[in-house]
Image (cartoon, rainbow, N blue to C red):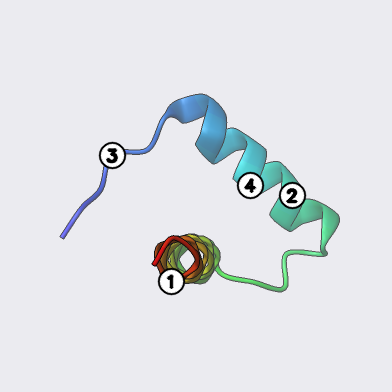
Amino acid sequence: MSVQIDTDTLLRLISQLKLRSGTQDISEAITSAIELWLREQAGLTKGSQ
């Protein structure tokens, strides 16, 4: 599967990974970001019940 990511967003992500000494694979970083967003969304949904 492929996912289109805005170029500026991708470049910012790469820049941040370089600042962290490149210890995380870009795919792992994207997965982590999506998982964080999903957890936050679940928390918002629970908070509105």
Answer few, some or many: residues within 10 Å of disc 4's Cα (few below 14, many 20 plus, some between 14 and 19).
some
| Residue drawn at point x = 53 percent, y = 67 percent | 36
Which circle, 1 or 3, is nearer the viewer? Answer: 1
Looking at the image, is mark 1 or mark 4 earlier in the sequence?
4
CA gap, disc 1 and disc 2? 31 Å
Residue nearest the viewer, comparing 26 with 44: 44
Mark 3: give few (<14), some (14-19) or many (20+) Cα within 10 Å: few
- Residue of label 4: 14
Q: Are marks 3 and 2 in contact (CB under 8 Å)?
A: no
Per the rendering, the mark at residue 26 is none
Residue 21 appears left or right of 33 = right
Callout 4: SS: helix
Which amino acid does the dot numbered 1 rest on? Lys
Per the image, label 1 sits on a secondary structure element best described as helix
The residue carrying mark 1 is: 46
Structural distance between the alpha carbons of marks 1 and 4: 33 Å
Label 2, residues with CA under 10 Å away: few <14, some 14-19, many ≥20: few
Q: CA distance from mark 1 to mark 3?
A: 30 Å
- Across and down, in percent, residue 23 comes to 72, 73
Q: Where is the N terminus found, in terms of image quarters?
A: bottom left
Residue at the disc numbered 2: 16
Residue 26 % position (x, y): 52, 61
Three-letter amino acid code at disc 2? Gln
| Residue wearing tag 3 | 4
Q: CA distance from mark 4 to mark 3?
A: 15 Å
| Percent x, y of residue 8 | 54, 26
